[in-house]
């Protein structure tokens, strides 16, 4: 009897310890996700700053080239005018000499013909050729900006934090914490990019925070680890196949619309980013769950590589349409 009581106490103590570990695991995941999303917000604003900086440099170079061409044309007009005056004076001198020497036998004054050939030739100026530096500046893109690459590095670190967070906390908690990036952006963008913070921005942030809080509070604080067979069963269920069909159709439609109407509405590209982001979250959760459950044996499962392809591909498309 005492042995049974001791065994029961040991089992109860182990259960309490396991519950505490799961609670701390969720806390670690939440903190990691918050820090990662703040880094992502910094990264997006730095990349935006890179685009603004490059556009300003191109506009400044264009105005400088126009002023140079205008000054060059004015200088050539002055030269042409001076040449025309010189030709006019030389013609008058020649005609007056011929009058004095009696070269005109019929007694009439010689006809004075003025040649402005030099004037027309001087006015046909040669346009200044554009140098190699101006051509390189025209073809320069954001890929050559160190600020843009700094943003990519910070975004990679932030997404790595989100990746770790999925291994510690349920996806239903980690995914809504992406609203932290939105709130951070509303603070960073006015400071870094001098963007105005409007009243509707405030209400939009408030609604987003309220939605994230409701989702987090209603989600489970812990979950069971999923192995490769569990993940395969989950993605072969009809619910996921329905989700896959709907989102794939929307992605195809928005990809077509982005090439044709993307310059008119930003909502098309944002919709693509959101759809690809859903696949990024699902594949990240799957890989993180496999790593936390089986560690290095994850590399022996074929489904791991399928999840990695989806993860990398969706992340690349997000970066493409965010920029």
Image (cartoon, rainbow, N blue to C red):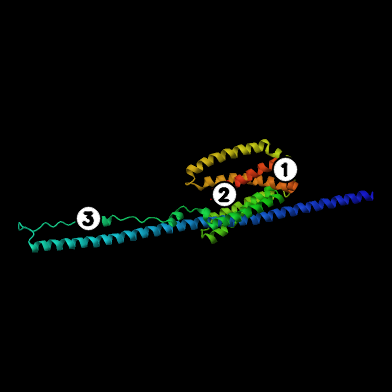
CB contact under 8 Å: marks 3 and 1: no
CB contact under 8 Å: marks 2 and 1: no
From the viewer's perspective, is 294 left or right of 129? right
Element class at badge 2 = helix
From the viewer's perspective, is 121 left or right of 258? left
From the viewer's perspective, is 231 left or right of 276? right
State the CA–CA distance, disc 3 to disc 1. Answer: 85 Å
Front: mark 3 or 1: 3
From the viewer's perspective, is 179 left or right of 80? right
- The picture quadrant where one finds residue 103 is bottom left
Q: Which mark is residue 117?
A: 3
Provide the residue designation for mark 2: 319
State the CA–CA distance, disc 3 to disc 2. Answer: 61 Å
Location of residue 129 in the rendering, given as x and y in whole percent from the top left corner: 37, 55
- Which badge, 3 or 2, is on the more N-terminal residue? 3
Could you classify mark 3 by the number of other residues whose Cα lies within 10 Å: few (under 14), some (14-19), or many (20 or more)? few
Looking at the image, can residue 14 be seen?
Answer: yes
Number of numbered discs overlaid on the protein picture? 3
- Please report the residue visible at 56 percent of the width from the left and 52 percent of the height from the top: 204
- Which badge, 3 or 1, is on the more N-terminal residue? 3
Element class at badge 1 = helix
CB contact under 8 Å: marks 3 and 2: no
Front: mark 2 or 1: 1
Provide the residue designation for mark 1: 300
């Amino acid at each position: 009897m005492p042995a049974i009581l001791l065994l029961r106490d040991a089992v109860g103590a182990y259960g309490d310890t396991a519950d505490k570990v799961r609670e701390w695991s969720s806390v670690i995941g939440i903190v990691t996700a918050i820090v990662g999303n703040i880094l992502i917000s910094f990264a997006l604003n730095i990349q935006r700053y890179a685009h603004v900086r490059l556009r300003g440099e191109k506009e400044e170079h264009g105005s400088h080239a126009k002023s140079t061409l205008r000054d060059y044309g004015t200088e050539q007009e002055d030269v042409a005018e001076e040449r025309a005056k010189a030709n006019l004076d030389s013609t008058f001198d020649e005609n007056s000499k011929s009058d004095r020497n009696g070269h005109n036998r019929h007694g009439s004054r010689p006809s004075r013909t003025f040649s402005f050939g030099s004037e027309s030739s001087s006015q046909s100026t040669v346009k200044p050729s554009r140098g190699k530096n101006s051509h390189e500046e025209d073809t320069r893109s954001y890929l050559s900006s160190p600020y843009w690459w700094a943003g990519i590095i910070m975004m990679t670190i932030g997404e790595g934090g989100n990746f770790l967070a999925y291994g510690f906390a349920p996806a239903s908690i980690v995914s809504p914490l992406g609203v932290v990036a939105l709130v951070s952006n509303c603070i960073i963008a006015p400071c870094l990019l001098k963007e105005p913070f409007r009243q509707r921005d405030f209400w939009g942030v408030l609604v987003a925070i309220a939605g994230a809080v409701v989702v987090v509070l209603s989600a489970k604080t812990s979950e069971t680890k999923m192995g490769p067979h569990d993940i395969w069963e989950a993605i072969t269920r009809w619910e996921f196949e329905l989700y896959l069909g709907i989102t794939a159709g929307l992605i195809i439609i928005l990809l077509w619309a982005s090439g044709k109407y993307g310059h008119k509405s930003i909502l098309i590209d944002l919709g693509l980013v959101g759809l690809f982001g859903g696949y990024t979250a699902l594949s990240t959760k799957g890989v993180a769950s496999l790593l936390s459950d089986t560690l290095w044996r994850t590399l022996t499962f074929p489904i791991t590589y399928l999840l990695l392809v989806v993860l990398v591909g969706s992340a690349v498309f997000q970066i493409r349409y965010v920029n």
